[in-house]
Amino acid sequence: MTDPILLCVDGLTVSYGGVTAVDAVTFTVPERQVTGLIGPNGAGKTSLIDALTGYTRPAAGRVLLDGTDITRRPPYWRARQGLTRTFQSVELFDDLTVRENLLAAREHTAESGLESLLPGRRKAEEHTADVARALELTGLGAVVDRYPSELALGQRKLVGVARALAARPRLVLLDEPAAGLDSDESQELGARLRSLAQGGVGVLLVDHDMGLVLSTCDQVMVLDFGRLIASGPAEKVRKDPVVISAYLGSEAAA
C-alpha cells in the first residue's frame, strides 16, 4: 500500500535578482517515509527549504501540505500546521537549558485554534509531554538540564532537531543535522529518523553525509544548479551516471 502524499511541490522557483536558486522543482514527500535531498554546495538545497517554510521571498509554483495550498502563507502559520525545520546554524538560547529551549519552541508554535481553548495547566502538561517525547527521540535526556554552551557541536545540532520535533510536526525538514556528528552518532541519528517516520511523521533530510542518506532514506532527490536532476530509490540514485558526475564521484558508485 502506497503511503499518502504529505507534501506536494509543483514547479517551485526561487530567484534572487538575476540568479535562479531553485529552478522549477517538482516532487512529493509521502507520510511515514524519509526523503533525502542531496547536491553540491550552492545547489539550492537550503533555498528550497527556505521557500517551503516561508523564510524567503514569495516563490513561483505551488506548495501543498496535505492538500492545502501554503505557498503564500507565513512561516508561523506553516509551523502551526505541522511543517517545521532545523537550520544549518543552530541558534539556541544560551541562557536557557535544553529543556527550556524546547519548551520555548513548543509554546511559540502552539496552535491558535482548539489548543488555545485548553486551560493553562492542561496546555502546559501537553507541552511538557511533547518536549519529553522530542528528547527521547533524539537521545538528549542526559543533557536536558544543561546549557547549550556546555554541549559539543553534535549535541547542539541534536537540540536543534529536538526543537523542531517538540512542535509535534507532521513533516520536519532537516538541514544538515549530521554536521558535527561522528560516525556512531550519525548512525544513531539515522535509526532515530527511521523510527520517527515509522511513527507517522514525514522527514525531508538534507545532508552531505552520504552514509546517513543512503542508509536512511526511502527515496533520494538530487539538486544541481537549482534543478532536480534525479530522484528515486537510494540505490538507483547512487548509481545514476548523471548524479555521479555532478556530485557523488566515482568512489560512491563502487
Image: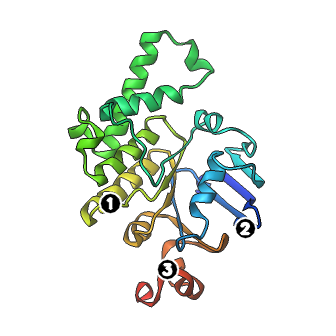
Q: CA distance from mark 1 to mark 3?
A: 24 Å
Q: CA distance from mark 2 to mark 3?
A: 29 Å
* Residue at the limit of the structure toward the front, as seen here: 17
- Please say which color scheme the image uses: rainbow
The label number, if any, that marks residue 238 in the structure image: 3
* Residue at the limit of the structure toward the left, as seen here: 142
| Residue at the image point whose x is 46% and y is 11% from the top | 120
- Dot 1: what SS? loop
Front residue of this view, candidates 57 and 203: 57
| Residue at the image point whose x is 55% and y is 87% from the top | 245
Find residue 153 and report its horizontal and vertical position in percent. 30, 53
Q: CA distance from mark 2 to mark 1?
A: 30 Å
Residue 5 can be seen, yes or no: no
The residue labelled by disc 1 is 180
On screen, residue 20 versus residue 211, left or right, reads: right
Contact (Cβ within 8 Å) of mark 2 with mark 3: no
